[in-house]
Image: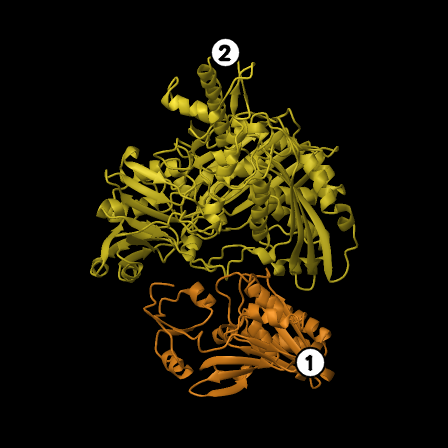
Amino acid sequence: MKIVGHKTRRVDGLALAKGKPVFADDMPKKDFLYAKILHSPIAHGRIKSIDKTEAMGIDGIAAILAHEDFSVHYYTTAGQGFPEPSPRDTRIFDDTVRFVGDRVAVVAGESLEVVEKALKLIHVEYEELPAIFDVRESIDNEIIIHPGKDGFSFLHDAKRNIAANIDEELGDVETGLKESAHVFEGTYYTPYVQQAHIEPHITLTWFDENDRLIIRTATQVPFHVRRIVGEVLDIPVGKIRVIKPRIGGGFGGKQEILNEEVCAAITVKTGKPCRLEYTREEEFYAARSRHPQYVTYKIGFRDDLTINAIDMEILQNSGGYGPHSLTVMSVTANKTLSLYRSPHIRIRANSVYTNLPPAGAYRGYGAPQGFFALESLMDEIAEKLNVDPMDLRKKNYFQEGEEIPIAKLLGEGREGFPVILNTNGIEACIDRGRKLIDWDTIRNSEKTGVFRRGVGVATVAQASGIAGVDMGSVYMKMNEDGSFNLNVGATDLGTGSDTALAQIAAEVLGVPVDKIIVLSSDTDTTPFDTGAYASSTTYISGGAVKKAAEDILQQILEQGKKILGITEAIIEDNHVVSPDGKSISYQDICTKSFYTDHQKQIQATASKISYDSPPPYNATFADVTVDTETGFVKVNKIVSITDSGQVINPQMSEGQAEGAIPQSLGMALSEFMIFDDKGRAVNRDFEHYHIYTSIDMPEIIAEFVHTHEPSGPFGAKAVAEIPIIGPAPAVVNAIYNACGVRIRELPITPEAVLSGFSKTK
Amino acid sequence: MWYSIKSIQTPQTLDEAFLQQQQEGSALFSGGSYLVAEKNPSIRTLIDINGLVDNFVNADDKAVTIQAGATLQSFMDTVKPINPNCRLFDGARASCPSKNIRNQRTFGGEVGQNRPNSDALVFLHAVDADLTIYTGSERTISIREWDGNGIVTQIAYYPNKIESIELQRFSVLQSAPAIVIVGGIRRSGQLEFAIGGTAHKIQTFNVMMNNWNKNSISEIAKNAVRQFIPDHFGSLAYKESLIATAVKRLGDAL
């Protein structure tokens, strides 16, 4: 292949590098209103009254909207396919607030200054209600966070505070555990962590000359934004256009209809254009984050060290509302149970409400929580059984040709589809990583002195889109200079997916990448796509691009033959060539097709849905040094080896790994959202919430092993999420190797390491 | 900038700047890193003193003189060729990892902010730097005695009076503010430590070399931790142990 599998310049790279006005906010804002949300200062309460009089009296204030300005309608803010498998438990504004940061009202005015002044002059009287902050105390608590109301749907058990539940079993786990020679159990905790995308949530709305509502927004899911805003504000989708410009990162945080409906409501109520942007502080307490989870595994092994039964429990914190609560837990179970074979598996999971901020989608989507538990426990088991942790894992992986039963059992809020494993490069990933990290030397080195070095490994699996749910579509047409417009519903949120899709089209058509003009995404001009999530874009949308490009190629061939007046021809070097040497170029075919010969537009549409979701695999190795006098951990090196099938663009794929690794290291060592005893977020800025920066990075080696997935475009599987999963458990396992301290709760604070070390003496 | 800023003053003299600084809602503006990060809505007037303070660093064996407008990066550029092991580099690097970032912190701003978790400030306390302060006229005082009043125009310290200098910082990430930072020097037969971090203030402690032992370390840690704040990165007991470890390591190195 000439283009797929090779580095190429990003199609949006120059515009970004030159600082061109490409982001949502980069547009003239003549006569715009500026909007801000009044957030709840209490964790749980009823709004007895809202007095807007004084605030409305400020010059320049155009509107203040609160619950009494909207009819009662429940929806979910989760940007998922319809019907969304998330509880419909949210109103645009409610008379009950359920976390510090919940929406109370929106104020719009001529400047941010007057709006901020007005926010302080809205007088809200609350009846404060008792609150739940500990996820372990939520179920059957006398405090009910969503007391039953008409209009809820897809909410598992409001009276017990259970937003979502999974209770599934294959085989007979109790018997399987009883019959096992060795049974091991562990419970592991992962906290709230933030996506921390550079660009905050921002939306601009206005009416165009035809009174259609235009929404320009930083989103991963433009078509879901259109549908949900239409539903909430009772506007037909045909009267709404959503434009997704360049996005400054999303990582799942923008798979949410976070403020689009609120900004649009201002435009609808006032007829004026409006802009609503979150500050960094609001991102921390009023946006979304990773669901905290307690995950317990009980695993039974036979004497030959193969797994006989896996019993899994999840207790997940949804926060005040339940977007993504079912599906994140489902992914936790689904992905972890897709790695190791076990005849008996059981999942019992609850996602429960608390009066903390709602969690949502975050890269990995439940898999990082689950694999932190599973891969930590596998290491503990290897230690107890005195076997090499990689040998133990290798004995239990699903092999090519095997069916993964959990895939059918747990789909996207419903039964899934069977997955037969076509490709599995995990053992090659392990073998490569083991060499690159210098496993045997460091693993077996003497562990003495103040500074102790260790290595750890974690092996993980993900998916390539959601089987039977994710759908991508493209429209493609040819131009007379031999270029092609590729209009894709897929959403490039900074990942470079536009470039990968252009490469796929260019490879099929045999043209340079710069001949592919990508437009993504605009609900008026690009066809439907479920959005950028679940590692679906390359596999699903890329599949649609390949189909459309193949259709175009066939049309070029047929049109060329007609123009040349021949019946046999091939395509060679951008020409249709007859056996006797007559030829016509792409450009001439298109020009003649437009103006003179057999006139038509060469164009194609294609959609792709897959009932497969082939897992990419990854082995991550960590090399750490532990200061045993202070408990501080320094990560020296991370080796991340991934099987994502045929890599479309090696540079961008490496970039995915290099971006994912610091996010996972942050979850392991430095990031967590802290709340005080009133449920208020304590660390609401980057001075107090510590993400990895360039100077904190360890040495990183990110490589790929090659497999060819027959169901993917050119053999590709997904790459976006898989590298974020392994670093945290690999670091935890490396710390154990270094100093004998086993950490089961993230983040790994130095105090916890020191305390653990003192117990090992 | 941010919407609450109604005016940016560019005073022609330090006297003018000092008078403007006394007005409510005013803040001195030089590098701007802290100001822009915080966007304090009560600040309505910025006083741009970039034209009033110099921005160079002079360094030789006897003295390091840092003009208030000098950035941490320019400090690194100047001092590194002379003293490649200067312990202030760690903190400076953490504060401004790239030469290309727009707002680089100035030394004047770093001192003026008076943050106990500032690496640079702990270092300057440790070396007992002299500050030149303008409060209607210029005067020079020890940084350890400055009450925060006035405009810092110059910082100076004297390596030739110090036998050795060390800095130890503990933070979860190099780029994160330190939980505990200890700067230490040895001069005239005694060890001097400046201790900052997640604390209310930077404290200094002196120990005679002949009293340097486990008990003195433990005493310093016990006293220092009183000004520390427990948080999610560590209890006070843990921070006390960190201080003790840092002091011991520094003392041994000095």
Residue B115 locus on image (x, y percent): 51, 72
Residue B53 visible in the current orientation? yes
Of A376 and A130, nearer the camera is: A376
Q: Is residue A234 left or right of residue A304?
A: left
Q: Residue at x 33, y 47 (%)?
A: A204
- Colouring style: by chain
Q: Residue at x 48, y 59 (%)?
A: A683
Label 1 neighbour load within 10 Å: few <14, some 14-19, many 20+: many
Marks 1 and 2 close (CB-CB < 8 Å)? no
- Say what secondary structure mark 1 lies in: strand
Residue A269 locus on image (x, y percent): 23, 46
Residue A702 locus on image (x, y percent): 64, 44
Question: Residue B186's mark?
Answer: 1
Three-letter amino acid code of the residue under disc 1: Arg
Q: What is the letter of the yellow chain?
A: A
Question: Residue A680's mark?
Answer: none
In the image, residue A148 sits, relative to residue B9, either above or below, namely above
